[in-house]
Image (cartoon, helix red, strand yellow):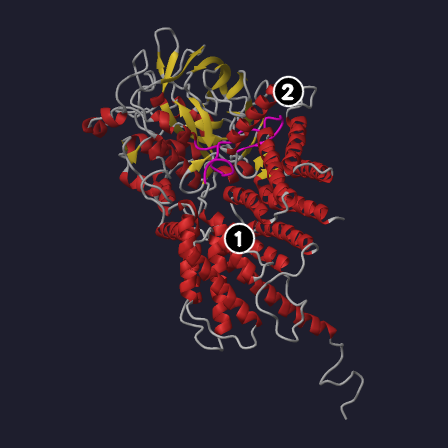
């Protein structure tokens, strides 16, 4: 196999090894096989065109054209001309897929399902990186710069990854791939180069073959530099929390049908911007055949995972939308129910990933790309599908259990109890203690749930306040119970948490209250109708709504008490506003007076920004310290090359070299400074030339004036005298000569080159080279010891052959 063919195979291997860092991000990882096939074809085309031979630019163009054709075959066959040639429709389809992939990147959690958009981004990205690596390493025969696209590929994966114990493995694979590429290039160059100038003559008796020759040594040094950069860059990148590949992303299905996963952001966050406007804009309107609408909450999603600081949707499996939904879990035939039909029209500006529906829905008629999550009985948009301007029909059940049915409900299934009564150890004990104190003497879970609801809504002295700042962290609920101020998010979160401590399965639902009736028979739902409420599970009835928030929504009939003087909201009144059109009054933060708050009068809706986990406590001190140190490190890392270069220059041009004993070291140090300074200014060193020819090259390329040119030649003469004279003599003024040459180069180059030489000197790569050589020497010594130990015959001791007696 020729050297170039070997280099091409190593380029493919390096790309695939670096791509391994992307494998944990997506499930399944079958895309890597498709990428490997495309890389193999791309490399084969490159090898064929280079044998013709074609011009380098033409070779790269042919590879790119073949790669584009294969991508079209795999991803846009139906839109292509004769199924293969990409045309306008194919490029438009590529754009749609990439946009969908970008949307998926902002929604899925790790590991994300392999949607068509994500597949195109992964496969297309890898083959583009592979083309760049092949062009640099094979076509242009310069493997060192090929580390940059490989580094970009690894850095993207490292930035998006959640980390974990195996993250080091992907770094090792990517680094090994790059080193293999450099080694292949070094061997190829070594087969063509002759002996090169590398410093002073070897001492007599030194094995000429010992140590690495210049090409291999250079490859190792450059590899060490790239590895150092690969280690430093991910540390300087900001952490990506939220968006794709994080558990807080809003999830959707794969779009291919039949499966996928879902992990959604708290819908309160997605509504945050629209909820905080001054004008109560209409979100949607609906018309229903039900005579009573006070219990017609439009539910978006349930938050069923509790980590002690916040509630969020769990990652769930999603399916295609069924024609009719199965019977709600836990609902028995003995419970009274009525099926109603509701026609909903969403506003043109309202783009929600989740579909607002009455709960529990039994069938949905709508168009677009939607997926069904069976546990929460919710619909979620797929590939960027939202509710914007959507009209749809929902058939749902009005479940009307009696208090007796709820009180006599049997115990929930064990699996459901395990999942929905789970509370973290960080939950303050006062939460459970308060729940037990409030519900003392209750005969069943129904009585406990009603007592919790009434305590929050009536008896506990809580104030409904949209401006409260409760804080974040594990103590947030405890502070809310102590301060007794908050809005629906706080009430629902707290009641659901307390119910779980009592062994009652609980979750939090997010959506809208029924809204306000209009003159044309429809109901209008505005931004300020956004709401959150707890749902508790009772076997035989299923998930059941409760309303602990004072002055919000309606208290369900099955939980209503007959206590005289109750201040519960009148269920016959609209949920919030009695106007016949969307309100244009200021938001609650401006319209609520102190007297209204004190009297707990209705004064608007809540902003979700005050929800647990989103307010003012801030990160702990150690996190702040870590962020500060990371920021300082990120600022200091770019300055390290400049600082090292200044230190190296100071040492090389110092006061040493005044005696015959260290004359050689001083002169070679000055020459090293000459070549490094020229390198910093863009004149790359050429070790194959003698000092005299190297000096002439620096003078010619650097356009040095006569004085600076003479200084360079004096240093070169001193180097030759050191290398070849029997008794090297000190040469005075070498440091001044170096400074004159530096000033001469500084005067002839552009401002950008001067800044580059100062802030990012190319010669700083020698630090990595030195580290690489030290590592190689250490390995060589260890290998020598192991080899010597392996050659020692077994059974010998004290220097005697085995079998020979000692006396």
Residue 629 included in the magenta stretch of the image: no
Q: Is residue 687 above or below residue 604?
A: below
Query: On the rendered structure, is 60 left or right of 251?
Result: right
Which residue position is annotated with label 1? Answer: 684
Within 10 angstroms of label 1, few (less than 14), some, or many (20 or more) residues? some
Q: Which residues are magenta?
A: 241-266
Looking at marks 1 and 2 on the same chain, the residue that comes earlier in the sequence is marked by 2
Q: Is residue 637 visible?
A: no
Which residue position is annotated with label 2? Answer: 79
Instruction: Report the number of numbered marks.
Output: 2
Query: Which residue is drawn at the image coordinates 68% and 26% (left, top)?
Result: 73
How far is mark 1 from mark 2, CA to CA?
50 Å
What percent of the width, then of the height, locates residue 563?
30, 26
Principal secondary structure, stretch drawn in magenta: loop
Q: Nearer the viewer, mark 1 or mark 2?
A: 1
Q: Is residue 797 above or below residue 771?
A: below
Q: Nearer the viewer, residue 77 or 545?
A: 77
The kind of secondary structure element at disc 2 is loop
């Amino acid at each position: 196999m020729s050297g170039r063919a070997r280099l091409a195979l190593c380029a493919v291997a390096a790309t695939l090894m670096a791509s391994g860092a992307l494998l944990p991000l997506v499930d399944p990882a079958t895309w890597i096989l498709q990428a490997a096939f495309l890389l193999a074809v791309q490399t084969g085309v490159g090898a064929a065109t280079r044998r013709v031979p074609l011009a380098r630019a033409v070779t790269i163009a042919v590879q790119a054209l073949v790669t584009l054709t294969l991508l079209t075959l795999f991803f846009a066959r139906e839109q292509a001309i004769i199924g293969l040639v990409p045309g306008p429709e194919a490029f438009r389809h590529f754009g749609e897929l990439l946009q969908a992939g970008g949307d998926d990147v902002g929604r899925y959690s790790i590991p994300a399902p392999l949607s068509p958009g994500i597949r195109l981004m992964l496969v297309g990205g890898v083959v583009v990186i592979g083309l760049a690596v092949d062009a640099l390493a094979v076509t242009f025969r310069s493997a060192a710069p090929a580390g940059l696209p490989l580094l970009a590929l690894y850095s993207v994966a490292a930035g998006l990854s959640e980390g974990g114990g195996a993250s080091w493995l992907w770094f090792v694979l990517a680094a090994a791939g790059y080193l293999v590429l450099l080694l292949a290039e070094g061997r190829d160059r070594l087969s063509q180069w002759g002996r090169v100038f590398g410093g002073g003559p070897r001492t007599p008796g030194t094995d000429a073959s010992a140590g690495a020759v210049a090409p291999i040594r250079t490859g190792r040094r450059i590899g060490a530099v790239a590895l150092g950069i690969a280690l430093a860059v991910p540390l300087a990148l900001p952490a990506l929390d939220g968006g794709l590949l994080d558990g807080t992303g809003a999830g959707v299905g794969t779009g291919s049908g039949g499966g996928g996963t879902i992990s959604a952001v708290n819908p309160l966050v997605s509504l945050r911007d629209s909820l905080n406007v001054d004008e109560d804009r209409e979100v949607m309107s609906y018309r229903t055949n039900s005579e009573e609408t006070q219990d017609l909450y439009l539910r978006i999603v349930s938050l069923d995972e509790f980590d002690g600081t916040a509630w969020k949707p769990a990652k769930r499996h999603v399916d295609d939308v069924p024609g009719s939904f199965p019977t709600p879990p836990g609902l028995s035939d003995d419970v009274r129910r009525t099926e109603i039909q509701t026609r909903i029209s969403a506003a043109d500006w309202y783009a929600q990933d989740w579909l607002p529906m009455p709960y529990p829905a039994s069938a949905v008629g709508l168009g677009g790309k939607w997926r069904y999550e069976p546990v929460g009985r919710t619909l979620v948009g797929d590939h960027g599908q939202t509710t914007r301007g959507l009209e749809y029909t929902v058939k749902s059940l009005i479940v009307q259990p009696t208090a007796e049915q709820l009180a006599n409900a049997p115990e929930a299934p064990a699996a459901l109890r395990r999942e929905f009564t789970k509370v973290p150890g960080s939950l303050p004990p006062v939460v459970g203690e308060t729940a037990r104190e409030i519900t003392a003497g209750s005969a069943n879970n129904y009585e406990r749930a009603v007592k919790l609801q009434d305590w929050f809504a009536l008896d506990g002295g809580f104030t409904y306040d949209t401006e409260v700042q409760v804080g974040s962290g594990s103590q947030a609920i405890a502070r809310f119970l102590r301060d007794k101020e908050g809005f629906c998010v706080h009430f629902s979160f707290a009641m659901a948490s307390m119910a779980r401590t009592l062994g009652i399965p609980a979750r939090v639902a997010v959506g809208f209250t029924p809204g306000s009736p209009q003159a044309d028979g429809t109901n209008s739902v505005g931004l300020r109708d956004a709401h959150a409420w707890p749902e508790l599970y009772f076997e035989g009835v299923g998930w059941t709504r409760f309303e602990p928030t004072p002055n919000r929504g309606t208290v369900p009939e099955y939980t209503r008490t007959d206590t005289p003087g109750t201040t519960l909201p009148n269920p016959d009144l609209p949920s919030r506003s009695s106007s016949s059109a969307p309100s244009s009054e200021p938001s609650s933060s401006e319209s609520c007076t102190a007297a209204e708050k004190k009297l707990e009068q209705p004064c608007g809706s809540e902003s979700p920004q005050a929800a647990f986990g989103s307010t003012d406590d801030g990160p702990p001190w150690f996190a702040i310290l870590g962020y500060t140190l990371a920021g300082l490190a990120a600022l200091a890392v770019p300055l390290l090359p400049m600082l090292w270069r200044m230190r190296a220059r100071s040492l090389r041009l110092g006061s040493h070299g005044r005696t015959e004993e260290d004359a050689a070291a001083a002169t070679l140090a000055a020459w090293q400074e000459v070549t490094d300074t020229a390198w910093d200014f863009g004149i790359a060193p050429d070790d194959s030339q003698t000092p005299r020819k190297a000096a002439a090259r620096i003078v010619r390329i650097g356009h040095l004036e006569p004085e600076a040119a003479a200084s360079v030649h004096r240093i070169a003469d001193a180097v030759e005298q050191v290398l070849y004279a029997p008794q090297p003599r000190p040469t005075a003024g070498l440091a001044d000569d170096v400074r004159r040459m530096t000033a001469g180069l500084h005067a002839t180059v552009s401002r950008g080159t001067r800044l580059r030489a100062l802030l990012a000197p190319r010669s700083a790569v020698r630090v990595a080279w030195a580290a690489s050589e030290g590592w190689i020497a250490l390995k060589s010594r260890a290998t020598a010891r192991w080899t010597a130990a392996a050659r020692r015959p077994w059974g010998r001791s004290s220097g005697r052959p085995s079998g020979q007696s000692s006396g």
